């Protein structure tokens, strides 16, 4: 005879199967990865589980609130007016129905030796939101939402052989407090950068300090200390539920999105509005009413349009990681730049983080694919050769409502160590860019340098045999091994044979804004066009498709196989199927409640009665 626990488990299993059959996407990610030949990779899981009550930030002695931090940053910049500049930029965002959201951010600029007229001209000519609206009117959003062959990068006006221009973004998500701590420290360090100030911080490594100062002499660094101010202010607002478990809704300390419940890192045009098959909820990564509807994304668009950077780093927390585009696919781009970037990230990971970081394609390394992301658009839309995502801290064993401890160090010494190490990594990344180690930035776009070629092959995520072959061929060419023509042909064939995997997505009939707030006519037909692309572009009914070549199963055979295995009954055309699924859920739900009540009355619960809190999934990170 079944025990009380057995009866409960059976009842839960039956209900879960019913719900799964009616609503879930039956997609085996690991099997799909194997079919296209994605190689296994190193994904360290760092952290320690903490029991409730969960820790909360110490605003007096460890972390700084946004207003205090901003005030200190202004004081630092004003103390070095020759080399630094700060300005406040504002945007009204899109009026979506009755929902409006205005926002602002600070842009800090540093140029060692003095701000040049070229730099001042670029930052003083940052346009208004009209720059964004003009681009939206001139570009078919259906093309961008489906990422078809009509997508074109915004032409550059600034010569690429001038000074290196780099942008660092911090605080894109409210709860990621450690990122703004790194940003403030980075600004302070740059303001007084010299041999005397840097040597004590970086263990008297004179070779490293000299290389940093040499690179800074020819670099303009742009820093956004906190992008998502409204989300951050919610995190700072006291909430009696902060630190508690077993809640029915997220407390303020867990706030990720902006105050309009939109994720600034899902509000960009490339695959804009598309939701992954394992989409969680809008309060985690809602895409907004339409691409570039949010003031945060509009402000950054305006900065990139004027500054035209060659490299961007978007700094997050929630795990330890360093990622490159794409976020929309688990397979890394097979280009000389992406492969070199991956090797350099692995080197930085070992030097500064003792190998704690997962490295590779964003859509694989973070554990999920994401659409409408900042870095994917920056790379494709603005043609930025290097667009990296850094995850600077994460307790990946934290429980669901331990939001502060999951995303941020809870000990002062650990915070200090991480801030110092990631700032050092940022400085070394600048030296790599300055030395031309990433192809296409101060170096040919299709070649490895000897230094990159000499680095060991890393165990990173999102690679296939095609990537490994291309990487080895590029290394042979850089080091003069083998016949040059044969090696060049080998590299070209390896890159051309790279498989692609298009993951299944949710196809919903409602608008992007789940609260049915229709966008204003400011966007015109571009919103509806992008919405059509979401339903018409790619595979139909949420089914994935796979395109593979060079010895991997053909497109038709793999797609047909997956069509039999991947279904979203939620979008089934048959109303009978929908009714049957609903009745099944209702019947088994009643059964579950009845059995649970009987077991409770007959046996009682031997535990405390409160179930273990859920844990954040890793895809809530980027």
Image (cartoon, helix red, strand yellow):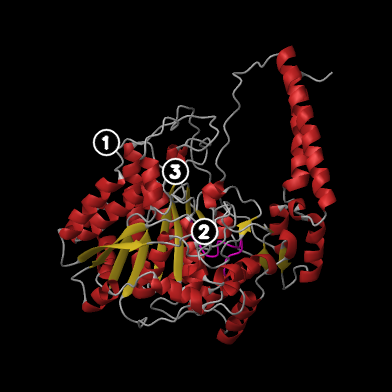
Residue 487's mark?
A: none
* 110 within the magenta span: no
Quote the CA–CA distance across marks 2 and 3: 19 Å
- The stretch in magenta equals 322-334
In the image, taking residue 537 as reference, residue 361 lies left or right, namely left
Rate crowding at label 1 as few (under 14), some (14 to 19) or many (20 or more) other CA atoms within 10 Å: few
| Circle 3 residue | 407
Residue 114 visible in the current orientation? yes
Foreground: 587 or 192?
A: 587
| Circle 2 residue | 266
Q: Earlier in the sequence, mark 1 or mark 2?
A: 1
> Given this view, does label 2 or label 3 mark the residue nearer the observer?
2
Q: Position of residue 506 (x, y in %)?
A: 67, 56
> Given this view, does label 3 or label 1 mark the residue nearer the observer?
1
Residue for point 28% across, 66% down: 211
Q: Tell me which corner region of the image, top left, top right, bottom left or bottom right, holds residue 34.
A: bottom right
Q: Tell me which corner region of the image, top left, top right, bottom left or bottom right, holds residue 62.
A: top left
Residue 6 visible in the current orientation? no
Q: Position of residue 620 (x, y in %)?
A: 53, 48
Residue 439, relative to residue 202: is it above or below? below
Q: Earlier in the sequence, mark 3 or mark 1?
A: 1
Residue for point 38% across, 47% down: 232
Quote the CA–CA distance across marks 3 and 1: 19 Å
In the image, taking residue 378 as reference, residue 302 lies left or right, namely left
Foreground: 44 or 365?
A: 365
Residue 60's mark?
A: 1
Q: Earlier in the sequence, mark 2 or mark 3?
A: 2
In the image, taking residue 154 as reference, residue 551 lies left or right, namely right
> Given this view, does label 1 or label 2 mark the residue nearer the observer?
2
SS at mark 3? helix
SS at mark 1? loop
């Amino acid at each position: 005879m079944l025990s009380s626990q057995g009866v409960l488990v059976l009842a839960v299993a039956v209900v879960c199967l019913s719900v799964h059959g009616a609503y879930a996407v039956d997609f085996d990610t690991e099997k799909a990865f194997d079919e296209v030949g994605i190689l296994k990779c190193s994904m360290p899981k760092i952290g320690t589980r903490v029991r409730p009550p969960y820790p909360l930030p110490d605003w007096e002695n460890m972390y700084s609130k946004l207003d205090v931090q901003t005030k200190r940053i202004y004081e630092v910049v004003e103390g070095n007016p020759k080399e630094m500049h700060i300005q406040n930029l504002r945007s009204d965002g899109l009026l979506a129905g009755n929902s409006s959201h205005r926002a602002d951010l600070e842009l800090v600029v540093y140029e060692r030796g003095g701000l040049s007229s070229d730099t001042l001209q670029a930052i003083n000519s940052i346009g208004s939101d009209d720059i964004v609206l003009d681009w939206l009117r001139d570009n078919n959003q259906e093309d961008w939402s489906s990422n078809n062959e009509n997508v074109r990068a915004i032409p550059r006006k600034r010569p690429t052989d001038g000074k290196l221009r780099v942008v660092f973004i911090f605080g894109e998500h409210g709860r990621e407090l450690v990122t703004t701590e790194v940003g403030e420290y980075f600004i302070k360090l740059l303001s007084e950068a010299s041999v005397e100030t840097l040597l004590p911080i970086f263990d008297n490594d004179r070779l490293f300090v000299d290389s940093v100062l040499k690179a800074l002499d020819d670099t303009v660094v742009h820093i956004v200390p906190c992008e998502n101010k409204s989300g951050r202010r919610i995190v700072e607002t006291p909430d009696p539920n902060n630190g508690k478990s077993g809640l029915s809704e997220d407390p303020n300390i867990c706030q990720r999105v902006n105050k309009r419940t939109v994720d600034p890192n899902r509000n960009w045009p490339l695959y804009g509005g598309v939701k992954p098959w394992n989409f969680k909820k809008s309060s985690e990564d809602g895409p907004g009413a339409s691409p570039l509807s949010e003031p945060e994304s509009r402000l950054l668009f305006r900065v990139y349009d004027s500054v035209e950077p060659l490299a961007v780093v978007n700094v997050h927390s929630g795990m330890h990681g360093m990622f490159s585009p794409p976020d929309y696919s688990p397979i890394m781009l097979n280009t000389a730049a992406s492969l070199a970037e991956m090797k350099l990230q692995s080197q930085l990971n070992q030097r500064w983080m003792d190998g704690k970081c997962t490295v590779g394609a964003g859509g694989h390394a973070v554990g999920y694919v994401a659409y409408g992301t900042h870095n994917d658009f920056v790379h494709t839309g603005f043609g930025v050769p290097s667009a990296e995502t850094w995850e600077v801290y994460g307790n990946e064993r934290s429980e669901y409502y331990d939001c502060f401890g999951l995303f941020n160090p809870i000990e002062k010494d650990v915070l200090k160590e991480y801030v110092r190490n990631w700032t050092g990594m940022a400085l070394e990344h600048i030296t790599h860019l300055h030395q031309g180690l990433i192809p296409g930035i101060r170096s040919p776009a299709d070649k490895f340098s000897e230094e990159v070629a000499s680095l060991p092959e890393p165990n990173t995520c999102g690679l296939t045999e095609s990537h490994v072959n291309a990487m080895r061929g590029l290394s042979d060419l850089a080091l003069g091994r083998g016949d040059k023509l044969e090696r060049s042909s080998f590299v070209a064939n390896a890159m051309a044979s790279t498989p692609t995997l298009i993951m299944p997505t949710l196809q919903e009939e409602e608008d992007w804004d789940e609260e049915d707030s229709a966008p204003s006519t400011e966007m015109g037909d571009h919103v509806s066009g992008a919405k059509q692309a979401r339903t018409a572009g790619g595979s139909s009914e949420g089914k994935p498709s796979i395109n593979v070549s060079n010895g991997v199963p053909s497109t038709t055979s793999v797609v047909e196989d997956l069509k039999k295995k991947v279904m979203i009954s939620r979008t089934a055309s048959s109303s009978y199927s929908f009714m049957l699924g609903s009745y099944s859920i209702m019947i088994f739900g009643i059964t579950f409640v009845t059995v649970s009540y009987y077991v409770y009355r007959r046996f009682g619960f031997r535990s405390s009665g409160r179930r273990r809190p859920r844990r954040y999934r890793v895809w809530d990170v980027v």
